[in-house]
Amino acid sequence: MLKRCVKHTITIALTATLTACAGLSAGNLFSHYTQQNTIVYQSVKSGQYEKAQAALPQDVVAGDILDNFERGRVDFLNADYPESKSALEVSDKAVRVQQDKALISISDTATSVGALAVNDNITEYVPPDYELGFLHLYLGLNYVQKNDLDGALVEVRRANRVQERARQAREKDLQSAENELKQKGLSPNLGSVLSRYPDAGNKLKAVQNGYLLYLSGLLYEASNDLNGAYIDYTRALAVAPDNEAVIEAAIRVAKRSGRNQDLAKLKKQYGDRPGVSEGQGRVIILEERGVVSAMQSWNLTLPVYDSQGNTALYTVALPYYVPTVSPKLPPVSLDSASVKTDELVDVNLMAQQQLTENMPTILLRQALRVYAKDQIRKGTAKDDDVGNLLFNVWNTLTEQPDTRSWQTLPGSVNAASKIVKAGKHTVSVDGQDYTFEVRDRQTALVWVSRQGGSATIWHKQLGRM
C-alpha cells in the first residue's frame, strides 16, 4: 500500500511541476479562472473600481497576457491611465513573444501532455482575435487620453490587421450566412455593399468589432485621413447598419471626400444628415455598458469500463455561458435631455461565438483527457480499491474547465452623435455630471464607461470634422 501511495504522490508532484513550468498558480489545479477572478469581476460589475484594483492578484494567475489584460482594463476604469498603459504594454509584449515562437516547442508540448492528465488551465493562454482587437483599442484610448493622436493611430492600424485576419479566417462562414439571407429573400445591407463585406447579419457582428471600427474612423478623420476614415466607417456600418452615429459619420466623410456615387446610395438608404454650421459643434458619445459574461462550469460524471469489467468514474468539466439579458439602464443625458445611443458592439455575442468555435477542440481534448487519466490510473492504482478511490478524488478535484477570457471587458458599447451650440455642455450619467467645452465647428469626444450605477467619464477634442 505504501508503494502505491508513493506512486500517487509522484504523480501529483509531476503535475505540480508541470504547472510551475507553465508559470501559472497552483490554483489552476483545483479551480478555474472564473472562480479565481470572482472578486475582481464582481467589483467591476458593481462599479467598485478601486476595490477591483485592490483585488487584482499580485502573483501569476493566468499568465502575463490575460493577467495584464485585466489589470490594464481595471486601471483604465479607475482613471489610472499610466498604470493601464503599462499593463497593456506587458500584455502586448507577451503576445508578440507568443506569436513569434515556433509553431510547436518542446516546452509547449510537455505542458500540453500535462494538461491532458490534469486540465487545460495549465496551458499557455492564447487570446482570441476579438480580445487582441480590444487590446489595441484600449492602448489606443490610452494614447487618446494623453492627447497623442499619432500613438492612437498606430494602435488602430494594428487593430485593423487583427480585424482583417479574423474576417479572412471566417470568410467561408460569412459567405454561407450571406447566401442563407438571400435564400430568405433578404437583401444585403448598404454598409456591407460599400465596405465589400458579405452581409452576414449577426454572424458579422460576432466577429467584427463595430466599436473598434467606429473609433478607428474617428481617429483617421481627426488626422484628416478621409480615405481611412471612410473605409472604417463603412465597415462599422456593415456591422451596425442602424447606428445613427455611424450613418452620420459615413455621410459626413462621403461629402468631405467627394464620393458622390456612394453619397447618393447613402442618401437613398438613410436620407441626408445636416452638417455643423457656424456657432455649432458636434458631441460624440461612446458609452460602454456593464461587463461581459464570465464563463461558468458545467460538470458531468461518466463511468469508464475496461475489458475486465472494472469501472472508474471520470468528471468531465466544460465551460459555458449563461444566457444574458442586457440590463435596463437610464439613458445618458446631454444638458438635461435624454440621448438615445445605438449599439456598436455586443461583446457577449463575440465571446459566445469564440466559445462556439473552440468547442470541437475542447471536446476532443476532453475525450483524450479521459483516456489519458484512465491509463495513469491503471498504471498507478492497478487493482488497489483505495488507490482507485484516491485517483477518482484527484480526478474530480483537478478536472476544471478552461474559463479563461478577458472578463472585465464591457458587455456592450453604444454611440451617439449630436450637433449642439458651441460652448459649455454637461453630460449626466448615473447621477454623475461632467461638464466640457464644445468648440465652434469642432468635435468633442465624450467617453463613458458605466457599471453598477458608477461611471468613468472623460472627453477630448478631435478638432474640425
Image: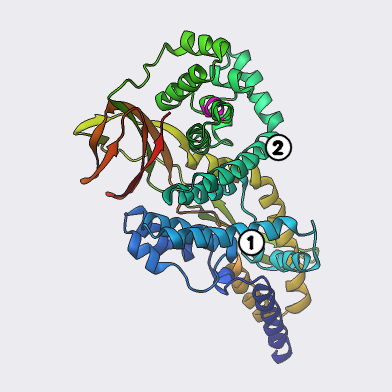
Residue shown at 34%/27% (left/top)? 441
Residue where numbered disc 1 is placed: 94
281 relative to 424, above or below: above
108 relative to 417, above or below: below
Name the residue nearer the viewer: 297 or 306. 297
In the structure shown, which secondary structural element does the residue marked by tag 1 occupy? helix
Question: How far across and how far down the image is residue 81, in percent?
Answer: 42, 58
Say which quarter of the image contains residue 41: bottom left
Crowdedness near tag 1: few (<14), some (14–19) or many (≥20) residues, C-alpha within 10 Å: some
Q: Is residue 140 visible?
A: yes
Q: How is the image coloured?
A: rainbow
Q: CA distance from mark 1 to mark 2?
A: 23 Å
Which numbered mark, 1 or 2, is in the foreground of this view?
A: 1
Residue where numbered disc 2 is placed: 169
The circle on residue 380 is none
Amino acid at dot 2: Ala
284 relative to 237, above or below: below
